[in-house]
Amino acid sequence: MSELPGDIYTEPEDIDVNTLANLGPLTALAGTWQGARGMDVNPKAEGPRRQGYIERIDLQPIDPQANGPQLLYGLRYHTHVVKPDEVETYHDQVGYWLWEPATEALIHTLTIPRGQVVLATGKAARDAKSFEVVARRGSTENGICSGLFLERNFTTTEFRLKVTVNGDGTWSYFEDTVLAVKGLSEPFHHTDGNTLAKIGEPTPNPLAR
């Protein structure tokens, strides 16, 4: 779909219902993963703080999704993060990774229980081993929406997430959330990064079972 179609209602026929066979660059992410060497750099009153973390991500295939003629394959995910030797949740996140085979478009959605949602977009070929998605403040296509407290005090101006699939079966990510923090004259780069190893295989999507 390099151009917007004239017919925006008719859905494609003969859809392959096996999502795991049609995830393109997202194929390597399907399953349950864990990483114990995460590093978070976040803003504090006394300056940047570095915090190690342990992370578990569950990415499971969903049935193919159609917006009229647009066809998307994807993974629903849940990320749970704790500090080493602690049980209290440090970070919790849910959303979707989506890929459109016809255009090689990537969509990443992010929702956190602190009053923020993000829709980031990018492009990646079917066999890509590295890809990036981006969201920017004010965009209606790949944007960021925050609750009042975050919007006034820790304004997110840009979000970037780069994923790299490694040759040993792991995958890594680096995330850069650019903040305009109240009281700081320069943008603050709130960064996170980790490498994840598979601890569980994905479950086929309902239509493919």
Image: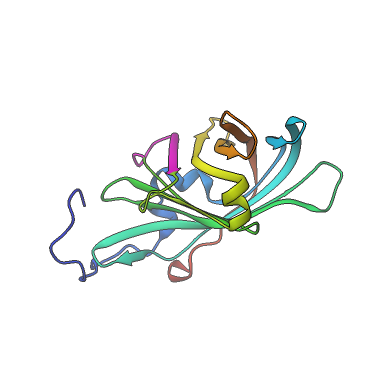
Q: Residue at x 15, y 66 (%)?
A: 7
- Residue at far right of view: 85
- Residue at left offset 77%, top offset 31%: 46
Which is nearer the eye, 153 or 65?
Answer: 153
Residue 138 appears anywhere in the view? yes
Q: In the rendering, at what x and y percent does residue 48 appear?
A: 71, 30
Can you give x and y, in whole percent of width and height, for residue 139 in the image? 38, 49
Q: Residue at x 44, y 41 (%)?
A: 133
- The residue located at (39%, 57%) in the rendering is 73
Q: Is residue 77 visible?
A: no
In the image, residue 92 sits, relative to residue 182, either above or below, namely below
Vertical order, 187 against 199 (above or below): above
Determine whether, in the image, residue 79 is placed left or right of residue 100. Answer: right
Look at the image and name its color scheme.
rainbow
Magenta span includes 83:
no
Span colored in magenta: 124-135
Q: Is residue 58 above or below residue 83?
A: below
Direction from residue 80 to residue 8 in the image, left or right? left
Does residue 127 belong to the magenta stretch? Answer: yes
Number of numbered discs visible in the structure rendering: 0
- Image quadrant of residue 67? bottom left
Residue 45 spot, x, y in % from top left: 75, 35
